[in-house]
């Protein structure tokens, strides 16, 4: 799983399946290969001579965000010195990273697209489940059911109000970047995007083209934001469907 190290504006990923540690500053990718259990044990004991090696604890710790990080550069090599606070101990570790032949799109952008699509599908499914639960509750009430514990009572779920609590993000620029740069994935990944149709902003609906919603009483701005959000979700879903169809 990719982790974001805010203090140094970089991402890193310890891939247990390929025994590879990846690091990127969003400009270049660095890696250390052949990271076996024996390799980790030897390096751990090198920098933590007074701490007993607990394989499960150490492996789980290295996949988490460090409490402190120091980056050293030696020519083209990057040394990542990390510290982790585990109970009362401070565990140290370092990675000696070489430039990777992989590029940022292959190791980061493409997995993000897949994860984003999965998140959107999961979110929609949860919303549908909540709506069905609201219908079920209304049916119970219609049949005479009475809730004795008022503290557990909930209001009917409003998807629009729920969305208004979160910052609106326009994904056009991101999707356009994906469309223009995704070709490099064809030779390095089994997931390929053969076609990604993105409507240009000039052709999209404007604020004035959105019909008023008299029953909901929403402002034009809120209706426009909601319509824009639905368009963005549709684009991401289409991208994700193309990804999964080509697995």
Image (tube, helix red, strand yellow):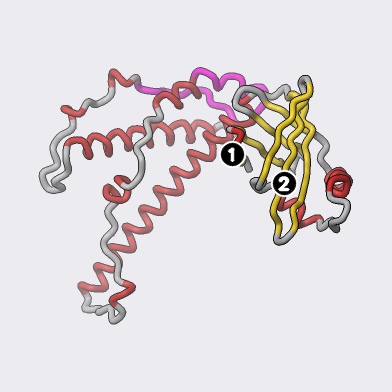
Residue furthest left as drawn: 214
Q: Quadrant of the N terminus?
A: top right
User: Is 101 left or right of 209, judged from the image as shown?
Assistant: right
Q: Position of residue 213 (x, y in %)?
A: 14, 42
Instruction: Specify whether residue 244 is in view.
Output: no
Q: Circle 2 sits on which residue? A: 83
Quadrant assignment, res 144: bottom left
Q: Position of residue 193 (x, y in %)?
A: 53, 26
Q: Position of residue 103 (x, y in %)?
A: 65, 23
- Picture residue at 52% right of the left edge, 34% below the top: 113
User: Is 140 left or right of 245, judged from the image as shown?
Assistant: left
Q: Nearer the viewer, residue 218 or 99?
A: 99
Q: Secondary structure at mark 2?
A: strand
Residue furthest bottom as drawn: 148
- Picture residue at 67% right of the left edge, 44% below the top: 68
- Picture residue at 30% right of the left edge, 33% below the top: 228
- Give the magenta range: 180-199
Q: Circle 1 sits on which residue? A: 4
- Picture residue at 30% right of the left edge, 66% below the top: 154
Instruction: Specify whether residue 144 is in view.
Output: yes
User: Is 247 left or right of 157, judged from the image as shown?
Assistant: right
Q: Position of residue 166 (x, y in %)?
A: 35, 44
Q: Is residue 109 magenta?
A: no
Q: Nearer the viewer, residue 65 or 124?
A: 65
């Amino acid at each position: 799983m990719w982790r974001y190290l805010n203090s140094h504006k970089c991402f890193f990923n310890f891939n247990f399946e390929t025994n590879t540690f990846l690091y990127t500053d969003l400009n270049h990718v660095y890696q250390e290969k052949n990271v076996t259990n024996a390799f980790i044990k030897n390096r751990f004991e090198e920098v933590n001579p007074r701490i007993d090696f607990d394989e499960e604890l150490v492996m789980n710790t290295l996949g988490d965000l460090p409490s402190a990080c120091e980056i050293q550069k030696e020519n083209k090599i990057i040394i990542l010195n990390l510290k982790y606070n585990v109970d009362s101990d401070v565990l140290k570790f370092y990675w000696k990273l070489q430039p990777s032949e992989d590029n940022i799109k292959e190791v980061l952008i493409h997995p993000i697209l897949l994860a984003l699509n999965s998140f959107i599908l999961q979110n929609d499914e949860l919303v549908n489940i909540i709506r069905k639960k609201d219908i079920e509750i209304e049916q119970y009430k219609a049949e005479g059911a009475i809730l004795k514990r008022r503290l557990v009572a909930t209001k009917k779920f409003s998807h629009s109000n729920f969305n208004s609590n979160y910052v609106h993000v326009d994904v056009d620029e991101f999707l356009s970047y994906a469309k223009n740069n995704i070709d490099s994935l064809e030779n390095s990944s089994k997931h390929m995007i053969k076609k990604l149709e993105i409507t240009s902003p000039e052709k999209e609906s404007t604020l004035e083209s959105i019909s008023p919603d008299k029953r909901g009483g929403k402002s034009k701005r809120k209706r426009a934001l909601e319509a824009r959000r639905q368009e963005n979700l549709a684009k991401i879903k289409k991208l994700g469907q193309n990804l999964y169809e080509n697995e």
